Image: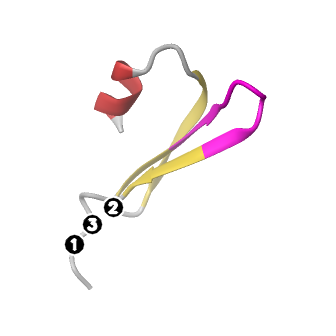
Amino acid sequence: MDAFRQSHPELDWQGEIEVPGGKGATFLDPDGNPVHLFDQSTAGPE
């Protein structure tokens, strides 16, 4: 998530949260619609 956010500073980032196994973030697209991203790459197998 951190690398994606750093490589896209032009996006209108709205916030970031901790989720089980990683992070979630929201940005607004050019039309103002929210886009939610989730990275759970640190989650272990169940």
Q: Tell me if label 2 and label 3 are in contact, CB under 8 Å.
A: yes
Q: Earlier in the sequence, mark 2 or mark 3?
A: 2
Q: Tell me if label 3 and label 1 are in contact, CB under 8 Å.
A: yes
Q: Earlier in the sequence, mark 2 or mark 1?
A: 2
Provide residue 43's location: percent of width, then percent of height. 27, 66
State the residue at coordinates (59%, 47%): 36
Q: CA distance from mark 2 to mark 1?
A: 7 Å
Q: Residues within 10 Å of mark 1 (few under 14, many from 20)?
A: few
Q: CA distance from mark 2 to mark 3?
A: 4 Å
Q: Amino acid at mark 3?
A: Ala
State the residue at coordinates (63%, 43%): 35
Q: Which residue is mark 1?
A: 44
Provide residue 46's location: percent of width, then percent of height. 26, 85
Q: Quadrant of the N terminus?
A: top left
Q: Which mark is residue 43?
A: 3
Q: Residue furthest right?
A: 32
Q: Tell me if label 2 and label 1 are in contact, CB under 8 Å.
A: yes
Provide residue 18's location: percent of width, then percent of height. 45, 49
Q: CA distance from mark 3 to mark 1?
A: 4 Å
State the residue at coordinates (29%, 30%): 3
Q: Residue furthest bottom?
A: 46
Q: Residue furthest front?
A: 31
